Image: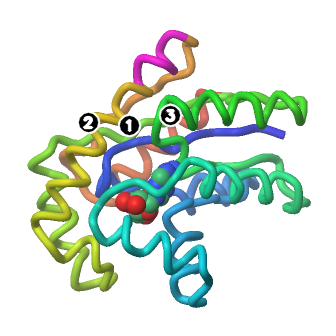
Amino acid sequence: MKTFILFGPPGAGKGTHAGAITQKYNLRHISTGELLRAEIAAGTKLGIEAKKLMDAGSLVPDSVVEGMIESAYDTVKGVEGFLLDGFPRTIRQAQDLDAILQKRGAKVDGVISLMISDDTIRKRISGRALAEGRADDADPEVIENRIRTYHSQTEPLIGYYKAQGKYHEIDLNEGSIEVNRAKVLSLVAGLG
Ligand code: AMP
């Protein structure tokens, strides 16, 4: 089982490009954000707790998202591997992921980083607010908190994966979705 991580700040296009990668390489897309939004829509206890943090642009506890990841690894069959999107988001989650994978005889095979500037984050998120109707996309203060959270808690993962030779970055500030999709697919093709 292969594990690839789709990394990048909010609004970089992880959700937009995930489908092309998973189809081409028969991977299961696991977006912790989407799984959490499904819990909210279903009105579960976990969803109700997570909603407060998500609406503020803060992270939910590591144990919550890690439970979701472990359960996917233990239940999903018939794929070549996983494309993790929005996870890990902290060094702690990355270390825990290493342990989760090691227990199952797997490892992180590569990190595909979609990089955009803070200004592009602001533009992209406010652009999709109407289309997707996400509460955390609509409020400029929440967007700023997500940008801060990204820089303080998630960006350190770049060094973590660079040190392991697994980090591959592409600049997606410019370009149409089609052009950027081709860039993403050609990067992934080189990962083997
Ligand atoms: P996303 O759809 O990836 O932008 O995630 C939306 C929100 O879900 C984030 O702002 C967090 O509140 C929460 N979330 C998603 N993934 C994680 C994670 N790996 N760790 C903690 N919180 C997360």
Q: Amino acid at mark 2?
A: His
Residue 132 lies within the magenta run: no
Spatial separation of the CA atoms under disc 1 and disc 3: 22 Å
In the rendered structure, which amino acid carries the disc numbered 1? Thr
Q: Which residues are magenta?
A: 158-163
Q: CA distance from mark 3 to mark 2?
A: 24 Å
Q: Earlier in the sequence, mark 3 or mark 2?
A: 2
In the rendered structure, the answer to whether residue 179 lies left or right of residue 185 reads left
Numbered tag placed on residue 187 in the rendering? 3
Q: Magenta segment, principal secondary structure?
A: helix
Label 1 sits on a secondary structure element that is: helix
Question: Disc 2, disc 1: CB below 8 Å?
Answer: yes
Query: Which residue is at 28% across, 36% downward?
Result: 171
- Residue drawn 10% across the image and 67% down it: 140
Front one among 142 and 76: 142
Q: Disc 1 marks which residue? A: 154
Residue 84 lies, with reference to residue 134, above or below; the image says above
Q: CA distance from mark 2 to mark 1?
A: 6 Å
Residue on which the image places disc 2: 151
Residue appearing at x 48%, y 19% in the figure: 160
Q: Is residue 182 above or below residue 165?
A: below
Indicate left or right for 138 with 10 as reference: left
- Quadrant the N terminus occupies: top right
Magenta-drawn stretch contains 161: yes
